[in-house]
């Protein structure tokens, strides 16, 4: 080491930065305005299908085609008047409100209200839950 001369350090500064901004951050209004102020180029692209559900509107689904082929009246099955009366009588017999019954079957109170008003589309799982909680058979023999 005696003949090598003075010892110098040949270090270059290292700059540690955060990750590069994500695509969402680049689209942020503040980021766009900052880029405009700094004179950077800003590219805007109009997407032709932006904001649409392309999958839902692209082609007719199998169910839609079946409805078109089989029936002229395109309506869903509704809760029968007999079922809605049975639900209401059983609920009142147990002295439960619609909200309490909904909580017991882990459904929203609006579901119970729709079943009792006849507006709901019958779901066998919900009807089974109602039968179990109310302790009555709601569906007749079919």
Image (cartoon, rainbow, N blue to C red):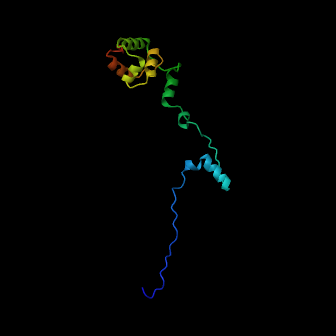
Say above or below: 40 vs 1. above
Residue drawn at the location 62% of the way across and 41% of the way down: 48
Q: Is residue 140 left or right of residue 36?
A: left
- Residue 27, given in percent of the width and then of the height, sits at 59, 48
Image point (51%, 61%), residue name: 16
The image quadrant where one finds the C terminus is top left
123 or 114, which lies in front? 114
From this view, report whether residue 111 is shown above or below residue 6: above
Name the foreground residue: 123 vs 135: 135
Identify the image quadrant of residue 106.
Answer: top left
Task: Name the residue rendered at 52%, 71% in the picture.
Answer: 12
Query: Residue 86, image x and y in percent?
Result: 38, 12
Q: Residue furthest bottom?
A: 3
| Above or below: residue 93 compared with residue 35 | above
Residue 137 x/y as whole percent: 33, 15
Q: Position of residue 99 (x, y in %)?
A: 42, 20
* Image-quadrant location for residue 130: top left
Number of numbered discs: 0
Quarter of image, res 134: top left
Task: Name the quarter where the N terminus is drawn.
Answer: bottom left
Q: Which one is in front, 124 or 111?
A: 111
Q: Is residue 54 above or below residue 13?
A: above
């Amino acid at each position: 080491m005696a003949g090598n001369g003075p010892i110098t350090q040949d270090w270059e500064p290292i700059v540690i930065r955060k990750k590069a901004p994500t695509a969402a951050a680049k689209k942020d209004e503040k980021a766009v305005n900052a880029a405009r102020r700094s004179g950077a180029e800003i590219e805007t692209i109009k997407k032709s299908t932006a904001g649409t559900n392309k999958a839902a509107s692209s082609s007719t689904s199998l169910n839609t085609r079946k409805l078109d082929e089989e029936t002229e009246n395109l309506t869903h099955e509704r809760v029968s008047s007999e079922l809605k009366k049975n639900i209401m009588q059983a609920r009142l017999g147990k002295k439960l409100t619609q909200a309490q019954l909904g909580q017991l079957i882990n459904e929203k109170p609006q579901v119970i209200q729709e079943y009792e008003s006849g507006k709901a589309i019958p779901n066998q799982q919900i009807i089974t839950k109602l039968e179990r909680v109310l302790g009555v058979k709601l569906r007749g023999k079919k």
